[in-house]
Amino acid sequence: MDPRLTGLDLKTFLLSASDLLMPRVCICCGRQLLAGERHLCSTCLADLPLTHYENMVHNPMADKFNAAVEATGYERAAALFYYSGDYKKITQALKYNRNFGVGRFFARMLGERLAAAGFKADLVCPVPLHWARRFRRGYNQAEIIGREVARALGAGYATALLRRCRRTESQTALSAEERARNTAGAFAVRGWGVRKAGTLESILLIDDVFTTGATVAACAAALRAAYGPQVRISVATLAFAGE
Ligand SMILES: [Zn+2]
């Protein structure tokens, strides 16, 4: 190899070479990516259906979350994009196909937007999977998102604060009421995770997709039971699937 190649040239060279061997494609439309593109082609990226909920204190997701948690104050909630069309493939790639790169990429985008919109939290806490499901899948997609969001907000990161005490049925075919019943009491705060009352003011819950809010509301109930009703609990997800 030419010794005059700089590190950057070398990286570009290696990327181009690997593109020839195994072309990188847009996760949404399948088109081959150009050198400067990552995960999405520029067309799909430009059309990414952003919710902009991080800039709206009142939004449809926050309304659903607040209705589900029966909070004393109005809590914030935001998602990066609408769960629609080919953009569903972003969260599916992370959840089912071990595409951590795509998860981190969009989680960073979410974290930067939350930080710019003034989201603050003492702790970022991903929604846990039941241990049996986590064992089978090998990872929890919400943890991958949460780590990037915590970094962007400069917040503490607690992957093991909550645990899922029982397995819940798949929620895809359930109504909102059935989902609430399915997840009620499904989460608990680990004993060692409880700090002294008053030391923790705000927690940001993280999940991949927000649908009815039943899952995050059940997490919020467990956190309030452990930390008291005054703790502020907000929520952020990659996608919003509610209408
Ligand atoms: Zn595309």
Image: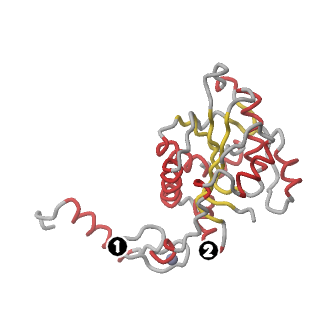
Q: Which of the 4 quarters of the picture holds residue 35?
A: bottom left
Image position of 172 with respect to 118: above or below: below
Image position of 242 with respect to 36: above or below: above
Q: Callout 2, which amino acid? A: Asp
Q: Callout 1, which amino acid? A: Ala
Image position of 242 with respect to 37: above or below: above
Crowd rating for badge 1 (residues with CA inside 10 Å; few <14, some 14–19, many 20+): few
Residue lying at the far left in this picture: please name it: 4
What residue is drawn where x is 80% and y is 57%?
171
**Could you say whether the residue bearing mark 2 is in a helix, strand or loop?**
helix
- Left or right of residue 78: residue 228: right
Residue 208 coordinates in the image, percent (x, y): 64, 55
Chosen colour scheme: secondary structure
What residue is drawn where x is 57% and y is 37%?
121
Residue that numbered label 1 is attached to: 35
Crowd rating for badge 2 (residues with CA inside 10 Å; few <14, some 14–19, many 20+): few
Q: Is mark 2 within 8 Å of ligand 1?
A: yes
Q: Which of the 4 quarters of the picture holds residue 96?
A: bottom right
What residue is drawn where x is 70% and y is 27%?
227
Residue 188 coordinates in the image, percent (x, y): 75, 33
Residue 166 or 217: which is nearer the viewer? 217
Residue that numbered label 2 is attached to: 86
